[in-house]
Image (spheres, rainbow, N blue to C red):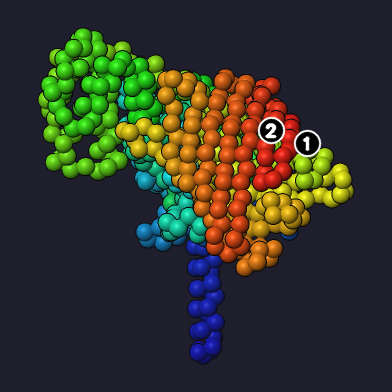
């Protein structure tokens, strides 16, 4: 055969092709021979539309009917368009699980290690032969699972914290309890939290970004005692713990999915995809038969998610109430005699117990609770005020502890009943009513709000004498004119009437904004934008029983074209009394007078008496007699919570 360069090139080309085919093509052929039937089976069963696949990828239907994952981290997906295409993501994920271990870049982990929950589910649904899969080592995942050694999951609810806009509805997290741990070591377990990465302290910016999903939300794990320290001791928030009856297999699925979403950024929405919603979604990933998130198509209120747990038959086992430091301290103080309280006040003022004649007159059994209460107060005082060792309270710590050590143990005081959020009313409220007004005649009324609780709502399960209202319109239809008027649209109205306690220096306050009718200046069909703020004190004594009296300095501003200058700004007084006779009856006597010297020079005032009767926690009847500026009115509403 004659020698030629083209012949040599052709020969080596065929040889290289043969070598390449022998080393690579069989592997590709074997992969296709096994993976392609799996993909066809997934196609036939439409696994990409299976509820569990959607749970694992956190897909939600968007406004145009398509799919969008809550996850905004590209590394969470195997397909370039996996965020919006469940089908493409399933195919890419299945192929990724068959990538040879040798082809994984150095420093990276095999997809089987990154997405173990998806792997387990696909192996089960498609009956994948484990021998056909590559066998990568996953030391990080194995170590994480072994170190957690979880035997039980517990949902934890922390009550509201009025000082933080992000925590006004309470907070939900998950605790992972280790095998073999007793109740005495529960604080050493790990907690799982979902929260927004806040990049601002401005409450207005915070609310805006939270409402429109402009924060990134992330899961995190931490020692549980850290959250108890923060919530119970520093922020005075009561904690309820709900042990779940998940079995080992369900816990394992939950942990595998938690591994997948660790440090992955989600799109955080304050009203729905918040801490409570994502904890429920995590539970569904462990036990897909649960339908917890279905309870919240529009908004997710943390306290209401506890009710969703109880709606699942047998899901909640034991419930544990963990009162805050201030709740325990208040219970102790409420049980004291006059001599015990005087002794405590001496200690709280920074004087040694030996300087108190009242303390010396107490019996041994009476002294122990006083010292216990003082030590609790000292802990609260130091943590909240961040006092140094030079503080007068701390100077007597050693002598007080020595004195306490020689006394017998004191029985714990009867603390609050610990009625959890599952015992409270539902969040949505619809009110239908009617009445008569001196300046408008007979009318019917309609009001609706999606959240949350008002001063006259059924009290158990909520903070006493508190109010958090969002987006509540109040409409009246006057029969005489045949017209409907918007009396008020409350965007936000938050009230806290907490009786003053010198130890904690509580204040009573209110803040709100929205639109309201200008009926008081003769234009019931006109509305003005308003912002209001009040600050003052509330008081309750043994003589007044359940009555709480409050007095606050009020500031108010309004914008509207009916004002001569387009606005008015004023100051005044907001005062009243709240009396909760029992769970069924609650009364409010209120009055508010404002003087507007700036802008439209004018006065405004109103006062009245409201009485609420609760048929049950979700159905109430409220009657009001009031005077609004120069007009008397009387009306009644039937309220339904759902």
| Precedes in sequence: disc 2 or disc 1 | 1
| Figure label count | 2
- The residue at 27%/23% (across/down) is 373
Dot 2 alpha-carbon crowd within 10 angstroms: few under 14, some 14 to 19, many 20 or more: some
The reply, left or right, for residue 36 in relation to residue 381 is: right
Residue 308 at x, y = what percent? 61, 31
Q: Between residues 246 and 448, which one lies in front from this camera angle?
A: 448
Residue 445 at x, y = what percent? 77, 41
- Secondary-structure class at tag 1: strand
| Quarter of the rendering occupied by the N terminus | bottom right
Residue 77 in sight here: no
| Quarter of the rendering occupied by the C terminus | top right
Residue 606 at x, y = what percent? 62, 43
Residue 331 in sight here: yes
- The residue at 43%/31% (across/down) is 539
Residue 231 at x, y = what percent? 39, 37
User: CA–CA distance between discs 2 and 1?
Assistant: 9 Å
Q: Residue 268 shows which numbered tag?
A: none
Q: Between residues 174 and 5, which one lies in front from this camera angle?
A: 174
Dot 1 alpha-carbon crowd within 10 angstroms: few under 14, some 14 to 19, many 20 or more: some
Q: Between residues 283 and 41, which one lies in front from this camera angle?
A: 283
- The residue at 60%/53% (across/down) is 603
The reply, left or right, for residue 434 in relation to residue 214 is: right
What residue is shown with label 2? 624
Q: Quadrant of residue 331?
A: top left
- The residue at 50%/68% (across/down) is 19
For residue 169, above or below residue 33:
above
Q: Are marks 2 and 1 in contact (CB under 8 Å)?
A: yes
- Secondary-structure class at tag 2: strand
Q: Residue 435 shows which numbered tag?
A: 1
For residue 359, above or below residue 29:
above
């Amino acid at each position: 055969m004659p020698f030629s360069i083209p012949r040599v090139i052709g020969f080596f080309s065929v040889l290289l092709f043969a070598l390449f085919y022998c080393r690579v093509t069989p592997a590709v052929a074997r992969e296709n021979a096994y993976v392609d039937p799996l993909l066809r089976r997934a196609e036939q069963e439409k696994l990409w539309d299976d509820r569990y696949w959607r749970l694992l990828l956190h897909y939600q239907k968007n406004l145009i009917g398509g799919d969008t994952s809550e996850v905004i981290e590209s590394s969470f997906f195997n397909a370039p368009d996996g965020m919006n295409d469940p089908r493409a993501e399933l195919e890419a994920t299945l192929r990724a699980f068959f990538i040879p271990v040798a082809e994984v870049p150095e420093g990276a982990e095999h997809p089987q290690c990154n997405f173990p929950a998806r792997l387990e589910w696909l192996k089960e649904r498609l009956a994948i032969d484990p021998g056909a899969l590559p066998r990568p080592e996953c030391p990080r995942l194995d170590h994480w699972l072994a170190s957690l050694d979880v035997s039980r999951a517990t949902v934890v609810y922390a009550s509201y914290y009025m000082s933080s806009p992000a925590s006004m509805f309470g907070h939900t997290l998950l605790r992972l309890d280790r095998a073999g741990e007793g109740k005495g070591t529960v604080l050493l377990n790990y907690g799982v939290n979902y929260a927004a990465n806040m990049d601002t302290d401005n409450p207005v910016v915070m609310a805006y970004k939270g409402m429109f999903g402009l924060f990134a939300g992330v899961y995190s794990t931490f020692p549980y005692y850290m959250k108890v320290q923060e919530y119970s001791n520093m922020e005075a928030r009561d904690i309820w713990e709900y042990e779940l009856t998940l079995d080992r297999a369900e816990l394992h699925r939950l942990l595998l999915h938690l591994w997948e979403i660790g440090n992955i950024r989600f799109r955080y929405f304050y009203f729905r995809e918040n801490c409570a919603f994502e904890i429920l979604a995590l539970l569904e990933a462990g036990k897909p038969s649960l339908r917890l998130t279905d309870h919240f198509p529009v908004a997710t209120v943390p306290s209401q998610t506890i009710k969703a747990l109880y709606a699942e038959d047998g899901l909640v086992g034991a419930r544990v109430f963990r009162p805050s430091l201030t709740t325990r301290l208040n219970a102790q103080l409420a049980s004291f005699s006059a001599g015990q309280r005087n002794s405590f006040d001496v200690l709280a003022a920074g004087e040694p117990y030996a300087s108190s004649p009242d303390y010396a007159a107490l019996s041994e059994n009476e002294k122990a609770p006083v010292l216990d209460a003082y030590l609790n107060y000292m802990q609260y005082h130091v943590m909240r005020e961040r006092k140094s060792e030079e503080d007068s309270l701390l100077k007597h710590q050693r002598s007080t502890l020595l004195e306490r050590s020689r006394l017998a143990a004191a029985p714990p005081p009867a603390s609050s009943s610990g009625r959890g959020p599952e015992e409270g009313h539902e969040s949505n409220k619809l009110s239908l009513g009617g009445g008569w007004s001196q300046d408008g005649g007979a009318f019917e009324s309609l009001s609706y709000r999606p959240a949350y609780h008002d001063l006259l709502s059924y009290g158990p399960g909520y903070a006493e004498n508190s109010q958090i209202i969002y987006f509540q319109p109040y409409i009246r239809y006057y029969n005489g004119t045949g017209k409907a008027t918007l009396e008020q649209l409350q965007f936000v109205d938050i009230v806290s009437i907490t009786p003053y306690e010198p130890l904690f220096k509580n204040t009573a306050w209110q803040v709100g904004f929205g639109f309201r009718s200008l009926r008081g200046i003769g234009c019931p069909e006109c509305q003005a934008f308003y912002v209001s703020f009040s600050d003052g004190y509330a008081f309750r004594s043994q003589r007044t029983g359940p009555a709480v009296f409050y007095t606050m300095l009020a500031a108010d501003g309004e914008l509207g074209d009916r004002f001569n200058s387009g606005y008015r700004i004023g100051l005044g007084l907001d005062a009243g009394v709240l009396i909760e006779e029992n769970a069924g009856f609650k009364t409010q006597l209120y009055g508010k007078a404002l003087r507007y010297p700036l802008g439209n020079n004018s006065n405004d005032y109103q006062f009245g008496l409201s009485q609420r009767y609760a048929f049950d926690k979700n159905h109430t009847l409220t009657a009001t007699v009031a005077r609004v500026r120069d007009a008397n009115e009387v009306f009644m509403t039937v309220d339904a919570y759902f």
